[in-house]
Amino acid sequence: MHYFRLCPPLYESDLQRSRQNPLEVIDEFSIPGIKCDSCGQIWAGSRKLYLPLAEAVRKSGLAKQLRPGVLQDSDWHRLIEDLRAVMGLPEDYQFWPGDALGRPILKLNRIDVPHDVLFPWTGEVVVSERVLNLLREADLKGFIAIEPSVRLPKKLELEGGTIPRLFVLRVVGHGWREGSNLEDMVVCKRCGRRKHPPKISSRIDVSRWDGSDFFNLDLNPNEVYVTDKAREVLASPGTNNIRLEELC
Ligand SMILES: [Zn+2]
């Protein structure tokens, strides 16, 4: 079995990167960052949970607090407890600082997006309806396709035109590299802050990989990996805005 890291091509400049990927994903809601009393650090991660918010959360006023920023330790934990309670989530449901919630918002800087696979930011993958259909036809696992709400700059709104149907892929498959594990990564039990393991091995521990075609490794949401089966579909004609680096 071969595995590949799914990433954008190496662009010559940031300008070229944004021309080829003329879009941005904005979080509708997010868990604030924390200033942890135990380790003293201020931090927020970048996990894209896109958990739909129950109507109760929107009505409770909690939604107003779900935005970027930093909360003191006790306020942060109180918010999480309230959120779990209002959403009916179990007490051990883990939110992390920075988690994106709600329905993603796609800010398009062009209507005629140039590619079928787009990378708004590290770890973020957006695909056209055509590519999503190919992924589904091939019965690939490990992702949830979310149709975002789309936002256009005023100028484009006035010009009109057909807005393309695009989908944000939320990667849900997971695995671990050989030698890495959660216990060694957690540096603070209070806030759950982790350091990513030094890349002792780039090999996947197949016994701890869930078999998904799209997956993250070592709980790092910023890198997306795919199987051979997914690579074949993604490398099909028309999807030229991608680079697949083989893991050795
Ligand atoms: Zn901490």
Image: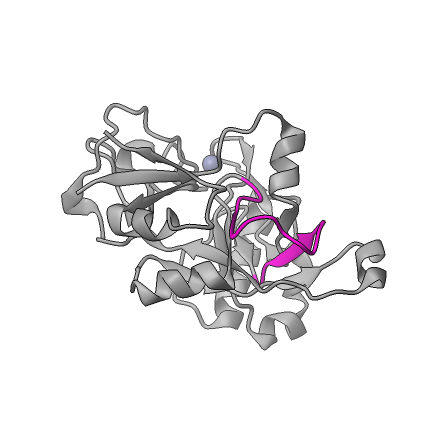
In the rendered image, residue 3, in percent from the top left (x then y), is placed at: 26, 40
According to the image, what is the colour scheme of the structure?
one colour
Q: Where does the C terminus fall, quadrant-wise? A: top left
Is residue 103 within the magenta segment?
Answer: yes
Q: Along the horizontal axis of the image, is 152 left or right of 190?
A: right
Q: Along the horizontal axis of the image, is 73 left or right of 94?
A: right
Question: Farthest left residue?
Answer: 207
Q: Which residues make up the magenta segment?
A: 102-121
Is residue 183 within the magenta segment?
Answer: no
Query: Eyeballing the image, is 168 above or below 56?
Result: above
In the rendered image, residue 157, in percent from the top left (x then y), is placed at: 81, 61
Residue shown at the point (84%, 57%) measured from the top left: 154
Residue shown at the point (60%, 70%) measured from the top left: 57
In the rendered image, residue 159, in percent from the top left (x then y), is placed at: 83, 61
- Residue 92 appears anywhere in the view: no
Q: Where does the N terminus fall, quadrant-wise? A: top left
Q: Along the horizontal axis of the image, is 143 left or right of 75?
A: left
Q: Quadrant of residue 156?
A: bottom right
Query: Eyeballing the image, is 202 above or below 77?
Result: above
Residue shown at the point (66%, 57%) measured from the top left: 65
Please tell me how many numbered marks the rendered image carries: 0
Instruction: In this rendered view, identify the residue nearer to me: 125 or 230.
Output: 230
Majority secondary structure in the magenta region: loop
Q: Quadrant of residue 245?
A: top left
Query: Eyeballing the image, is 21 above or below 16?
Result: below
In the rendered image, residue 246, in percent from the top left (x then y), is placed at: 29, 33
- Residue 100 appears anywhere in the view: yes
Instruction: In this rendered view, identify the residue nearer to me: 187 or 225.
Output: 225
Residue shown at the point (32%, 24%) measured from the top left: 198
